[in-house]
Image: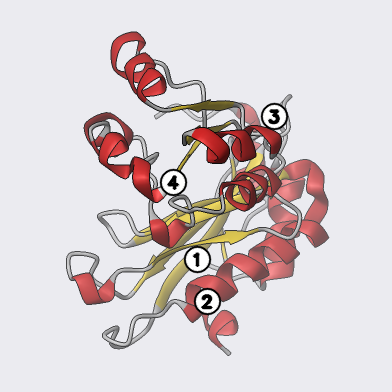
Amino acid sequence: MHKGKKYVDSAKTIDRSKLYDPAEALATVVSTAKAKFDETIELHVKLGVDSRHADQQVRGAIVLPHGTGKNVRVAVFAKGAKADEAQAAGADIVGAEDLMERIQKENFFEFDVVIATPDMMGLVGRLGRVLGPKGLMPNPKAGTVSMDVAKAVQESKAGKIEYRLDKTNIIHCPIGKASFGAEKLQDNFDALMGAIIKAKPAAAKGQYVRSCVVASTMGPGVKVNAAKLMA
C-alpha cells in the first residue's frame, strides 16, 4: 500500500522498537498528525482474552472527560412521553414504526448512535440485520437501551463511546481529536484504559493487555508500554 510523504516523514520520527509512556506516546501522535483536517486520535488495545467465549467478553461504555470532538447524531426509538423527552434532550431523530420504515425503505442512516426504550426493542430487533453490522444496535450494556432516554441522549452527545472486542480480540476506540492536545487526550486515554482494565473478565488468564497502540487517522501508530498501564 502506498504511503504519502507526510506519513513517511512522520514514521521516521517514531522508534518502532520502543514502548512509549502514555504521555510521550500521545505527544508524539499529536506532533505527527499533519493532515489538513483535524485528525481523530484512536486507541487500539489487544487483550489476552478469547472473544468467542461468553465469559471472556469485554464490553461497556464510558463518557470521555473531554468528549470525542465529534458532533454525534442521535436517533431514538420511543413513543409518547419518552419521545418528547428524547426530543427535549437534543435527539436528532425520534420515531418508531416510521423511523424503522425510513431505515428499511430509504436506507436512511443519518445518525451515529441509536437509543431505544425497552418496549421498542421488538421493533428495533427487526432492524438487527442492518444495524448490527454497522455497530448501531442498541444494547443495555452500552446504556443505549434505557427508560431514561434523556440521560442516554445527553451522554451520547457529550462523547460517550462504546468499547467492545472485535473478532481478533482488539478494541478500537476514538479518544479525541489532534487539536485537543496531549493533556486532554491523556485524560480521555486514562478514562478509557481504566474502564477496559476494570472490565477484565474473571475467566481471563495470563497477560490481560497484550499491546496498546495510539494513532491518528492518517499517521503511523505509536506503541504504548502496556505494563505501565496495569501497574
Q: Residue at x 35, y 59 (%)?
A: 165
Q: Which residue is mark 4?
A: 117
Q: Residue at x 54, y 41 (%)?
A: 82
Question: As shown in the figure, which amino acid type bears the numbered disc 3?
Answer: Ala
Observer-side mark, 1 or 4, equals 4
**Mark 3 Cα shell of 10 Å, populated few (<14), some (14-19), many (≥20):** some
Residue 36 drawn above or below residue 182: above
**Mark 4 Cα shell of 10 Å, populated few (<14), some (14-19), many (≥20):** many
Question: As shown in the figure, which amino acid type bears the numbered disc 2?
Answer: Ala
Question: As shown in the figure, which amino acid type bears the numbered disc 4?
Answer: Thr
**Decide: marks 4, 3 in contact (CB < 8 A)?**
no
Q: Earlier in the sequence, mark 1 or mark 4?
A: 4
Q: On the image, which quarter does residue 85 sit in? A: top right
Distance from Cα at disc 4 to Cα at disc 3: 40 Å
Question: As shown in the figure, which amino acid type bears the numbered disc 1?
Answer: Cys
Q: Secondary structure at mark 4?
A: loop
Distance from Cα at disc 1 to Cα at disc 4: 35 Å
